Image (spheres, rainbow, N blue to C red):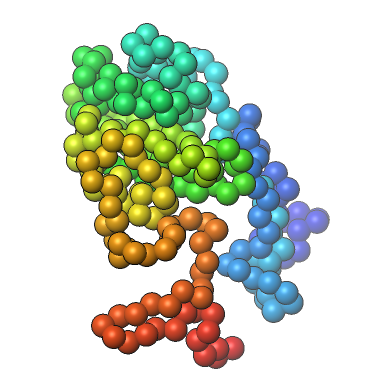
Amino acid sequence: MSDTQPENLPATSDAGDAQTPGAEVIDQREGMFGVRGTGDTSGFGGLRRQVALPGGTPKPYGSWFDGAVDRLEGLVGGDALEKVVVDRNELTLHVAREQLVAVCQQLRDDEALRFEFCSGVSGVHYPHETGRELHAVYHLFSITHNRRIRLEVSCPDADPHIPSIVSVYPANDWHERETWDFFGIIFDGHPALTRIQMPDDWPGHPQRKDYPLGGIDVEYKGAVIPPPDTRRSYN
């Protein structure tokens, strides 16, 4: 046991994810599970952790990654890829949003790549990553070569536009609608970008991290459910 770490308390690191070489620190978090004040008996309220995104990986990447990235850059140009990350033996390509459709087209159609299947798109919100607050993440699978790859595209809160890839991967239609619904990312060129989970007149996008957790009235079959911050407390 460490001389500086009390027994039965979680370890605390000032570095957190920033221990990853070349990591980009975007936030500092304190505590866990919303613990505040002196009522914490778990010790988690003392956690201090930096939130960081993995840095770019230099070549050689290893495995089949080098050949695939070189092939893609030869087809679309090096400017299409902002960063290549190999983390936990997984390959992530950070793609410039203007080049997303061209990149997907080559990943699907080129014989050396052949990523025929896109399992959808997910949104991520990093409020403290100025100018790149919203991220769209795509998971592609090559049935031909039995390989997986991840694409990540970012856009600012002030201009939340990313090209739709439905023309390349038609099954992404509803996934893009869900990401728009929950995160507010506008997929330009989508055939019918409407809400898919929330009512059409719902204000805001509920999975953004700056979305209020309480104070929103919810009506269900004529009965009004009080928002969480106005319900009776049993503490």
Q: Give the residue at x 28% y 52%.
A: 194
Q: Count of labels shown?
A: 0
Q: Quadrant of residue 3?
A: bottom right
The extreme front residue here reads 201
Establish if 157 lies above or below 74. below
The extreme top residue here reads 74
Q: Position of residue 40 (x, y in %)?
A: 68, 75
Establish if 108 lies above or below 150. above
Q: In this image, 96 relative to 104: left or right?
A: right
From where the camera sits, is residue 114 visible? yes
Q: In this image, 63 relative to 104: left or right?
A: right
Q: Give the residue at x 61% y 64%.
A: 32
- The quarter of the rendered structure image containing the N terminus is bottom right
Q: Position of residue 226 (x, y in %)?
A: 44, 84
Q: Position of residue 74 (x, y in %)?
A: 37, 8
- The quarter of the rendered structure image containing the C terminus is bottom right
Of 66 and 37, nearer the camera is: 37
Q: Quadrant of residue 200?
A: bottom left
Q: Give the residue at x 21% y 19%.
A: 109
From where the camera sits, is residue 90 visible? no
Establish if 107 lies above or below 77. below
Q: Position of residue 185 (x, y in %)?
A: 40, 45
Q: In this image, 147 relative to 60: left or right?
A: left
Of 148 and 107, nearer the camera is: 107
Q: Give the residue at x 55% y 47%.
A: 126
